[in-house]
Structures are given as structure tokens and as C-alpha cells.
Amino acid sequence: MPSNPALRFMNGIHRGLIALSAGQAGWNVGGMTVLEVTTTGRKSGKDRTVFLTSPIQEGDSMLVVGSRGGDDRHPDWFLNMRRKPEVKVSAKDNSDQNMVARIATDEERDRLWPLVVEKYSGYGEYRQKTEREIPLIWLDPISQTTEDESS
């Protein structure tokens, strides 16, 4: 399983690829959209940025997978989102969109997991490596969430 330094190194490489290509490369991996997600550190309170793949998008909402390569621990970014769900998301075609993270419901998970594995079979392999349930997290635009709640 990847260590925290290894994960930070991989994120640095990804950030460098995007910078060196002037934003033309690195925003799609294996047919999945790549997102730059900034969370608030649950211990430090500082901004923490990570690159994540989004295998599924529905409307303006994007799904990310808390797999950590099948590790028995949740990824730090997921723990940060659980503590403070407001995040900032950038993708190739949009910049710094304020969003809120929410864990998919059991019903959503039942519908989505086969689609996630179809998009990237590695997620199925990760699931076999760990006893924990790998979380599926929706990133919803804050304006959409606010409008839905007021309806």
C-alpha cells in the first residue's frame, strides 16, 4: 500500500505534468476525469490539495473514490472531507469551484459501484485487498446543494 510520502510524491509529479504541459495534459487518466481537490486539514486547518480521478459525473456532481490503493486506512483527504465537507475543486474546464462532499448512500453505492469498477477495474481489486468499505463520495456544487435544501 502506498505510504503518505509516496502519495505526496505522486501528487507532485501530477502537478508538474500539468504545469509543464501548460494545463494540456494530466486532466484525464484511464478515461477518468482528474480533479484537483483542496480540503481543509482536520488537524492543521491548512489547505491540503490532492489529485483524484472521478469515474462518474452526473450533472454538475462528480464522484470520487476513497480507495487509497486498497489500503486498510482511509485516505487523509477523505478524513478531511468528513470533518469539513466544504472543498474547492478544479478540473481542466473549470477552476476553483466551491463544492460540498457527501458520502454516497447505500442505495447510491449499490447502483454506482458496478459502474465505478467498469470504468476502472483496479477499484474492484482494491476492494478485495481491504476489509474496510471503500467510500464513494459525491462532490456537489454548493449552489446546487443550497437550492435543493431550500426546495
Image: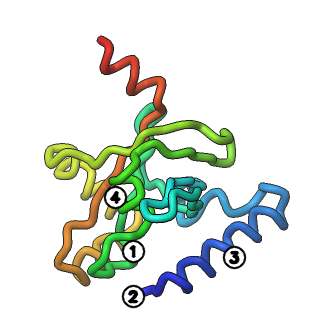
Kind of element beneath mark 1: helix
Give the total of numbered labels: 4
State the mark number for residue 23. none
The residue that label 2 is drawn on is 1
In three-dimensional space, the C-alpha distance between marks 4 and 2, rounded to whole angstroms, equals 20 Å
The residue that label 1 is drawn on is 68
State the mark number for residue 13. 3
Q: Position of residue 126 (x, y in %)?
A: 31, 77
In three-dimensional space, the C-alpha distance between marks 3 and 4, rounded to whole angstroms, equals 25 Å
Circle 4 crowding by C-alpha within 10 Å: few under 14, some 14–19, many from 20: many
Q: Which residue lies most toward the front here?
A: 44
Tag 4 near tag 2, CB within 8 Å? no
Residue 128 as seen in the image, left or right of residue 26: left
Three-letter amino acid code of the residue under disc 2: Met
Q: Residue at x 43, y 55 (%)?
A: 55
Q: Residue at x 32, y 71 (%)?
A: 74
- The residue mark sitting in front, 4 or 1, is 1
Q: Position of residue 56 (x, y in %)?
A: 41, 48
- Which badge, 4 or 1, comes first in the chain's sequence? 1
Tag 4 near tag 1, CB within 8 Å? no
- Which badge, 2 or 1, comes first in the chain's sequence? 2
Which picture quadrant has residue 66? Answer: bottom left
Q: Position of residue 111 (x, y in %)?
A: 21, 47
In three-dimensional space, the C-alpha distance between marks 2 and 1, rounded to whole angstroms, equals 8 Å
Tag 1 near tag 3, CB within 8 Å? no
Kind of element beneath mark 2: loop
Q: Residue at x 75, y 63 (%)?
A: 18
Q: Position of residue 104 (x, y in %)?
A: 26, 47
In three-dimensional space, the C-alpha distance between marks 4 and 1, rounded to whole angstroms, equals 15 Å
Give 82 or 52, whichever is nearer the viewer.
Answer: 82
The residue that label 4 is drawn on is 116
- Which badge, 3 or 4, comes first in the chain's sequence? 3
